[in-house]
Image (cartoon, helix red, strand yellow):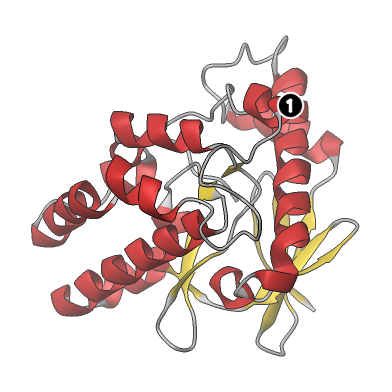
Amino acid sequence: MKKISRGWQYAVYDLQNSRVRKETSSPIFQYLHILRTNVFVRWNIFAEANKGMARVRRMEKISNNYIQSILPIFDAKLLGNPLFFDNGYEQDKTEVLSDVFRKCSLDKGKKIFDSYIQLIHATWQYGFADSVYNFCVNNGLDAESHVIQLDFGELALSKSDVEQDIRNKRWLQNASYVLFPKGELKDYFRELMDEEITLQKLDELWGAKLPGQSNEQTATPQLKQEQKFSLSPLKGTA
């Protein structure tokens, strides 16, 4: 097992069997990392860092519990076939999209964004959505060239929260879009999201594959409260 990366939330290890293991960093490491980097710029760095870290960890637990609850009916390939344990999870090893975009052609880049849309629509059908839209960091390309979700610790489980993200076009505020090189591919992404990530499409798909569920809210009141606290729009998660 070889460590290949480390973010403030996880240390990532290559298991050398086409799988990776993500172990949650200790609270002390997370707190010191926040203090050192001021990663959450809207938090008072001393008074609020610990409180904010605790909120994110609770969101992670709720999100991971939800994913585990739907795994029997869910296409687990969309999340890299995750296997959960007490301090993190394993999933298929992929190529992170930031690395793919550095070397891919314009045509392949467009196909990647098409696949990203398909992923978003698929997750909607199971009553959840990525709440960060930091696609360069939190998504990867699997062996079949499909975009999958690598980080699912901050999910939107409430349809109303996703509606708000759509109205605000939250994907335009986060680092993956803001820092993406200007040009035809960036324009393609923006136009594609406008066309495909819509309130009408959300109404059609939300919760469609959840047995016995309507396409209304799926989140608990606790999660709705947690999701009022968002990350800095120009910071990624890892």
* 65 and 4: which is toward the camera: 65
The residue drawn where x is 48% and y is 31% is 160
Whether residue 61 is situated above or below residue 105 in the rendered picture: above
Tell me the quarter of the picture where residue 43 sits: top right
Please rate how many residues cluster around mark 1, counting C-alpha atoms within 10 Å: few if below 14, some from 14 to 19, many from 20: few
Q: What secondary structure is marked by label 1? A: helix
Q: Is residue 72 left or right of residue 155?
A: right
The residue drawn where x is 77% and y is 58% is 69
Instruction: Check disc 1 and give the amino acid type.
Output: Gln
Residue hosting label 1: 222
Tell me the quarter of the picture where residue 192 sits: bottom left
Whether residue 193 is situated above or below residue 98 in the rendered picture: above
The residue drawn where x is 23% and y is 79% is 108
Does residue 50 appear anywhere in the picture?
yes
Q: Is residue 22 left or right of residue 85?
A: left
Does residue 198 appear anywhere in the picture?
no
The residue drawn where x is 65% and y is 37% is 219
Question: Residue 179: x and y, percent?
Answer: 28, 45
